[in-house]
Image (tube, rainbow, N blue to C red):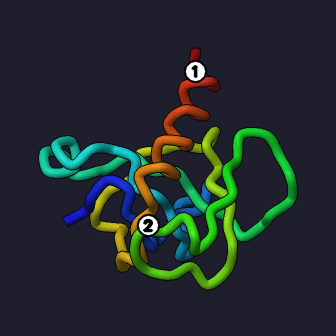
Amino acid sequence: MISQRDIILISFPFSNLKESKVRPVIVMSNDSYNKKFKDFIAVPLTSNLKLRDHTILVTNKDLESGKLIVDSQAKIDKIFSIEKSLVRKRIGKITRETHQHIKEMFLKIIC
């Protein structure tokens, strides 16, 4: 079961659709949506901490459970939908506060 606020590892396809790399993402879609559909909405995480617009730093202190290997940035402007079949494993869950911060930044981008 995929739940909102989960950090999961996915097999992320490259643009050529022939290769993929395992990457962490944060599940943003709500649990009702996640139960109903074969895909879910996610925000990618990156370990590249280069300062850029529309990112939020996510560290172990931002997790309710689990552990990140390295501090990461959530790339809010790169939100996407992906099939659940590409999920490899769950590695943690962000706090409600961090989730709210991500939602607020996303709304600033689209409003």
Residue 61: x and y in percent read 58, 70
- Residue at (53% x, 76% y) in the render: 22
- Return the residue nearer the eye: 107 or 18: 107
For residue 61, say whether it is visible.
yes
| Above/below status of 106 relative to 20 | above
Pointer 2 residue: 7
Q: Which residue in the structure is indicated by mark 1?
A: 110
Q: Is residue 110 above or below residue 87?
A: above
Q: Residue furthest right?
A: 50
| Rendering coords of residue 93 (x, y %) | 40, 67
Instruction: Please name the amino acid that badge 1 sits on.
Output: Ile
Q: Residue at x 83, y 46 (%)?
A: 52
Number of marks = 2
x, y percentage for residue 80?
Answer: 48, 44
Mark 2 neighbour class, 10 Å CA radius: few under 14, some 14 to 19, many 20 or more: many
Question: Relative to 16, is 95 on the left or the right?
Answer: left
Residue found at the far top of this picture: 111
Left or right position of 96 against 85: right
